[in-house]
Image (cartoon, grey):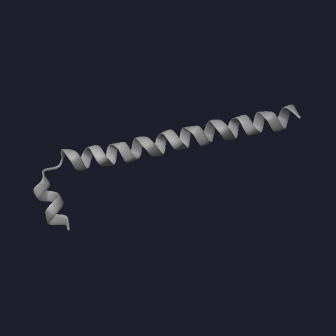
């Protein structure tokens, strides 16, 4: 039983870390888009 609990705890930590990482990646992407001039965004479309 302790082994199973340890594994699930590790999985939870990994899951939380991935969620935080995903959010930070999205935040960085939005920040970089906002920091770009609007002309560049319109040119890409």
Name the residue at 19% across, 65% down.
Answer: 44
* Coordinates of residue 11 in the picture (x, y in percent): 68, 41
Residue 40 placement, left or right of 27: left
Please identify the residue farthest to the bottom as the structure is shown: 45
Determine whether 22 is above or below 9 in the image.
below
Outermost right residue: 1
User: Residue 9's spot in the image, x, y percent?
Assistant: 72, 34
Up the image or down, 14 lies above or below 33; here it is above
Side (left or right) of 24 relative to 29: right
Residue drawn at x 30%, y 47% as measured from the top left: 30
Count the marks: 0
Which residue is found at the position 77% from the left and 33% from the top?
6
Query: x, y (%) of residue 31?
Result: 27, 43
Determine whether, in the image, residue 1 is placed left or right of residue 16: right
User: Quarter of the image holding residue 35?
Assistant: top left
Tell me where residue 32 appears, x and y as whole percent: 25, 46
Above or below: residue 24 compared with residue 39: above
Quadrant of the snapshot with the N terminus: top right
Left or right: where 23 falls relative to 3:
left
Residues 3 and 40: in front is 40
Quarter of the image for the C terminus: give it: bottom left
Residue 38 image-quadrant placement: bottom left
Q: Residue at x 18, y 59 (%)?
A: 41
């Amino acid at each position: 039983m302790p082994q199973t609990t340890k594994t699930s705890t590790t999985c939870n930590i990994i899951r939380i870390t991935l969620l935080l990482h995903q959010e930070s990646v999205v935040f960085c992407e939005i920040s970089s888009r906002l920091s770009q001039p609007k002309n560049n965004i319109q040119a890409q479309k």
